[in-house]
Image: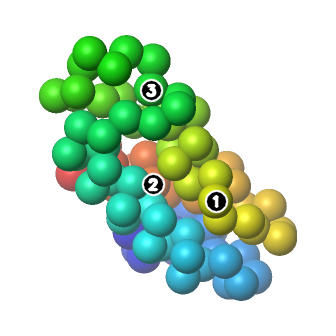
Amino acid sequence: MQAAFVEHDAFQCGYCTPGQLCSAVALLAEIDAGSVSAATEDVRALEHLPLTDEEIRERMSGNICRCGAYPNIVAAVKKVGTSA
């Protein structure tokens, strides 16, 4: 996850990075476990939840980034999630 954050320039000022990284790893574990979120469209498809931008944003919504690296963070999470 750290390498994907660097590749996608998701660090920027670094203020939020520790929390963003922890949440990103946790959200991938939640999706793998079949846990749904408020953004999950079809709760019947627990064996394969799609890793959409909306799903990532919802699950990362508790982290506040002051410099606005949100698109880069979503890209980094998506890269790791789709390659796992």
* Residue type beneath disc 3: Thr
The image quadrant of residue 9 is bottom right
Q: What residue would you read off at disc 2?
A: 77
Q: How many marks?
A: 3
Q: Is residue 5 left or right of residue 63?
A: left
The residues tagged by marks 2 and 3 sit, at their Cα atoms, a distance apart of 17 Å
Question: Residue 21: image x %, image y %?
Answer: 48, 72
Decide which of 75, 17 is in the foreground and name it. Answer: 17
Q: Is residue 7 above or below residue 78?
A: below
Tell me, yes or no, whether the two marked residues, 2 and 1, touch with CB atoms within 8 Å: no
The amino acid type found where label 2 is placed reads Val
Marks 1 and 3, how far apart at CA: 17 Å
Closer to the observer: label 2 or label 1? 1
Q: Which residue is mark 3?
A: 40
Label 3 neighbour load within 10 Å: few <14, some 14-19, many 20+: some
Which kind of residue does numbered mark 1 sit on? Gly
Residue 72 visible in the displayed image: no
Q: Position of residue 24 (x, y in %)?
A: 44, 61
Q: Is residue 16 left or right of residue 4?
A: right
Residue found at x 58% / y 42%: 58
Lower sequence index among marks 1 and 3: 3
Residue at figure coordinates x 22%, y 45% from the top left: 32
Q: Left or right: where does residue 64 sit relative to residue 66?
A: left
- The residue singled out by tag 1 in the image is 62
Quarter of the rendering containing residue 42: top left
Q: Do callouts 1 and 3 mark residues in contact (Cβ within 8 Å)?
A: no
Judged from the image, the secondary structure of the residue bearing numbered disc 2 is helix
